[in-house]
Image: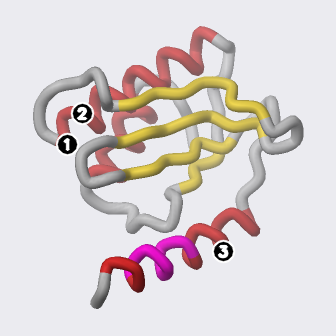
Amino acid sequence: MSVTNKQTKRLRRHARIRAKVRGTAARPRLSIFKSNRELYAQLVDDEKSVTLAAASSRGLTGAMQKKAEEMGKLLAKKAAAKKITQAVFDRGGYRYAGVIALFATSARNAGLSF
């Protein structure tokens, strides 16, 4: 399967998920993006189209799994500082496995519920 075909399929899955998932100020959408080397996540209020908190693995070192766990803790800490305790998880068309699952579990263990 070609790379563009994989990306197109992921974007279609992401569009289906986005049609169902909405974030508010009280319960923002936790959106995640994964590249080959890095991981990015943000809490988004879709009603106002505003990013409330964001985290990236760019400054972190180690394997992707370690970066995902540290980033989950970091994002949960930033959310707690803004008094956000609940979110709606938007997996971005990726399977809930591996790095995505590690990130989500780490964020949950750090106090963010979704």
Q: Which residues are magenta?
A: 6-11
Residue topped by disc 2: 67
Residue topped by disc 1: 64
User: Which residue shows up at 28% across the image and 33% down it?
Assistant: 69
Rendering coords of residue 5 (x, y %): 41, 85
Rendering coords of residue 59 (x, y %): 28, 21
Q: Rounded to the nearest whole Å, what is the CA distance between mark 1 and mark 3?
A: 27 Å
Rendering coords of residue 57 (x, y %): 32, 31
Give the image quarter of residue 80.
top right
Element type at mark 3: helix
Mark 3 Cα-neighbour bin, 10 Å: few <14, some 14–19, many ≥20: few
Q: Rounded to the nearest whole Å, what is the CA distance between mark 3 and mark 2?
A: 28 Å
Is residue 84 within the magenta segment? no
User: Which residue shows up at 24% across the image and 33% down it?
Assistant: 67
- Give the camera-side residue of 37 and 87: 37
Residue topped by disc 3: 16
